[in-house]
Image: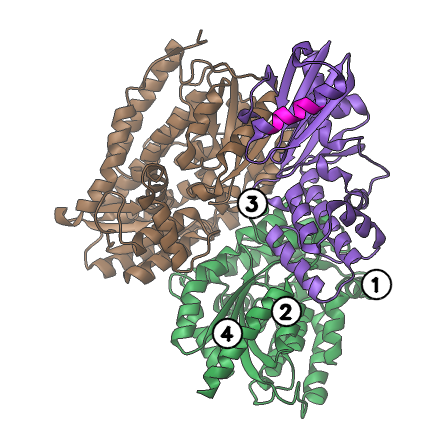
Chain colours: A brown, B purple, C green
Amino acid sequence: MARYKMEPLRCWDKAKELRRSVYERVAKARENGKIIVAGGTESMLALPAGYDMEFLGGEPYAASCAFAGVQDPGVCREFFEAAENARYPRDLCAYMRIGVGSLLADKYLAGGSYPRPTFNLQTHICDTHGKWYQIMSDIENVPYNAIDYVPYAWETENESEPSKKLKRDYLVGQMLDVIEWMEKVTGQKYDDERFINAVNWECESTSLWAQCCMLNRTIPAVMDEKTMFSFYVIAVLMRQRKESVDFYTELLDELKDRQRRGIAACPDEQFRFVHDSQPPWFALDVFRYLERFGAVSVAAHYSIGLSGGWTYDPELDTWLPALPPKGAGVELRTRQEACEWYAEWLLAYHTMLRSLRWSGRGKNKRILDIVKKWNADGMIIHLNRGCEGTAVGQMELHRFMNDQGIPCMTYEGNVADSREFDRERTIAKIETFMETLGRKKLY
Amino acid sequence: MVTAGMDVGARTVKIVILRDQRIVGKGVATAGLEADRAAEKAWEEALKEAGISKADISKVFATGSRRGEVGGFDDEVSEVVADGRAINKVNPEIRTVLDVGAEEGRAIKINSEGRVLEFAVNDKCAAGAGAFIEAMARAMQVSTEEFGALSLQSVKTIPINAQCVIFAESEVVSLVHEETDRADICKAIDDAISDRLTSMARRVQVQPGVALVGGAARGVGLQRSLTTGLQLDELFVPDDPEFVGAYGAAVIAAET
Amino acid sequence: MIADFKSIYENRHNYAREWKERNNDHKIFGYMCTYMPEEILYAARVLPLRILGAHEPQNVSEPHILGMFCPFCRDVLAQGVLGRYDYLDAIGITHSCQHIHQAYESWVLHKKIKNFFIPTPNNHQTSRALPYLRGQLEIFKEQIEEWTGSEIGDEDLLRGIDIVDKTRMLMGAVYETRKSDIPSISGLDSMYMVVASQMADKGEFNWILEEVLGSELPGRAAREDPGIRLMIIGSEDDDAGFVEMVEGFGASIVVDDHCTGSRYFWNVTEKEGDPLTRIAERYIKRPPCPIKDFPARNRVPHLIGLARDFDVAGVIVIQQKFCDPHELDKVAVTKALEAAGYPTLYLEFDVTVPLGPFRIRVEAFLEMLRSEALF
């Protein structure tokens, strides 16, 4: 008999519809009089939002291809092969290879030809990002610009205020330059009001998502991570839009209600764990398999951090949802003010982007905080060959967790390339891990 | 009480029968494509040695990557847990177990009761597994037994990059073409495998005593390379190291 | 003399220890990427030494860095874990690639050593990079002052610039001699020269360079018939065995683009502005590592220029296995070189290299180049 009550999430269908709509909107953008901007979604989505645009984000597009590729190899395996035939090495970022391959094959996931953007705009959050869209632009022959992103250090490193100011000014300066560049390449005036709204909505969306994630500290968790993937991706895709704010407002209410009534994501929750890195998108059933042991992933730095605005509280020595401008009583009135707020938001409050670059002491501490605050009993690390950014420092993290007495296992895989994933071996490892913890299958 | 452990590995099926915690019968057969047929053969051998029939056995626990392909067991345990329990029974001083199976190498950290604290497996890489050793023996055109004896004859250190077995084989071919002494090449290969195992072992923080199990543990050259590589005073290799998994499953069956 | 280059390279740790004994009130600073502003360290009378790997298989890095990251970064970390660099007083890194950054992070986690990180920019094509970098160099200078207990004034910085620029100019002059029909120094010795310069006190090293330029190279032929002229480009490379093998096949490597080669020293410090601005600008303008080369591709014209200036017949593109920055560039770079008339051979390296299979590839490439030369 199940331990906890369960109920389907009301927001589930809305999330699905919002996700689907993005790719359809990109496909119809031009006929609707919009420009198409392409780049990584882990970037400054609010920046090109000064135009009436649809954004084709490389990472979620590739993740969707990987997921869809389980049923249709033509939207995944074929893309990898197209990239490899063009001599791109196989150990490169899996998302990038899908994007490049999809473009080279001239095949779009939502049907038809691969959409050619008006321009590509990227934020260089990892070694690959700035180069990825350089390659795309070479092939597409469209204008390209990239913003360098040098994150603040972890609080363990005691970075000086002058260094932070330099990073902020550097980012703000580049943002202002890119706005002028966008005006040049589009021949259209940039709309500061649209930009300011987008910054506000991006900050509100990500703050709301962080608040949603906080509710998962409860036992039982109100969301399991597989569900969280379907929700966090709304912010990934469109956090700069009002729809995203509306969605998370509704979701937060629903989750609070579930928390009040003791509704669980997994009715058999007995063992809570924190996952690390993206999941293998083509093998999400692994999370369902873990539930057979009563094991539920209640958080991951990836899923709570990628779209979450988290601020570090030095007194409590932990991270809490950051306040968006309105929440902080700040009104953004000018382009300059919006750029400054936005830069600080990304540099200070985006711990996931920070962890793509800086691992070591700071990343270990950040993730230990998640394990403890989300009342986790263990950790499962996906050693992700398809994304080096999420994989930096993972071996140290594994050691660190075990040394803290937190049971921790690793499995090798790839975020999007199923050729790099051995399902049987992974299942065997999970079974072994559960066995070492004295956990048997419940069903 | 009579219990049995069945280890259905990638290459072989091993059976161990215990009566009152003593080994009374063992059997082994090559698994090939039909593991269940191999299991039957291994059972035949083990039961004959024990002088009993299957009906005399109270419980059978299975382990091994291919155990799902055969029937006839009451419960299953992972190789990692089976190894830990087995070694603890045989030598309670052991804290680190290195298991070199045909397709997988494992490093296991155990406590004084044989309980597994941590484990590491060489994912997607043959360079720390028995398959690598067999491939290298083929490249040297010797049997695995001859390989070990040759390796012991050498005292040279020739580095081979063993991250990838394909690259390693290329390097071996290069050494052969350079007319490098065969004994030196065999030792270089043992050192390379030892390096891979050591790398993996370090992930669980090697603590003395260290045991080496699995079929490849019989390799005397590998034993020497590991002892040197891990800077051990002693490396414990149990009798019949390839039966450790099956023995562990039988012990757990008796204790459950 | 030329033989000193190899000697310093092969005995790097002894060299460093002896230097320390001779200069026992000075510190040694190990760095992991050539964007490190050595000028500031020389200004502080600190010896900067580049940390490189040992080209030996090792079994100590796996608990720290996953095997999917490049062999070089794991080899570098292994040297730290094995205690080979225990004579260092500090380690430091700039904002480099994610691979080598892990080596730095793990070193800091596990060895109790003073550490410095300069968050340098990646996009060198934005005008914002220079003031940003200058600001970070100012902070770094203050950190070094605090560490050494000595102030670094402008005159110290100018002294540091002079020392490092002299090395650059002298090595540049050596490379110039390789443009001739019969180069006076081989690719192997040139490689030893550059990596040795990264492992030595440049003040002393400059004397060796002057001696080599003045006395040894004039009239010297590295070999009577240089054979096919090659360029070699890619990631960090100090694989002497491979370079020696290539040159043993009747080819001469006459120029390169590696951070253990020309990328390290190609441009000198700018002449305008205060010392820190001049230093910053030099690093902004130097031939870029691929991860610094976006949004536009500035590397490509530079590489084609090198190929043309040194009159090469073909290009060997080599990189560490799993090196993302260079893998991301390789398609565009090889395409551009081939379109400009320079055939390419692409090879991936590990810490040890299977010379047999590589020999086959290199021989075939050279035969192809020879037959093209015939027609």
Say which amino acid is labelled 4.
Val
**Residue at x-position 70% and y-position 47%:** B193
Q: Which residue is mark 3?
A: A159
Mark 4 / mark 2, whichever is N-terminal: 2
The span from disc 4 to disc 2 (Cα, nearest Å) is: 15 Å
Which label was assigned to residue C315?
4
Q: Is residue A406 left or right of residue B114?
A: left
Mark 1 against mark 2, which lies toward the viewer? 2
**Co-location on one chain, circles 4 and 3:** no
Q: Amino acid at mark 3?
A: Glu
Q: Residues within 10 Å of mark 2 (few under 14, many from 20)?
A: many
Alpha-carbon distance for marks 1 and 3? 34 Å
- Mark nearer the N terminus (1 vs 2): 1
Label 3 secondary element: loop
Which three-letter amino acid code belongs to the residue tagged 2? Phe
Question: In the image, is residue A390 part of the stretch drawn in magenta?
Answer: no
The chain under label 1 reads C
Which image quarter: residue C353? bottom right
The picture places residue C27, in percent across and down from the top left corner, at 74, 59
Residue nearer the viewer, C336 or A89 = A89
Which mark's residue is nearer the viewer, 2 or 3? 2
**Residue B57 image label:** none
Residue A4: x percent and y percent? 43, 10
- What is the chief secondary structure element of the magenta stretch? helix
Q: Chain of mark 3?
A: A
User: Farthest right residue?
Assistant: B233
Element type at marker 1? helix
Q: Name the residue beneath numbered marker 2.
A: C242
Q: Are marks 4 and 2 in contact (CB under 8 Å)?
A: no
Please state which amino acid type lies under the numbered disc 1: Glu
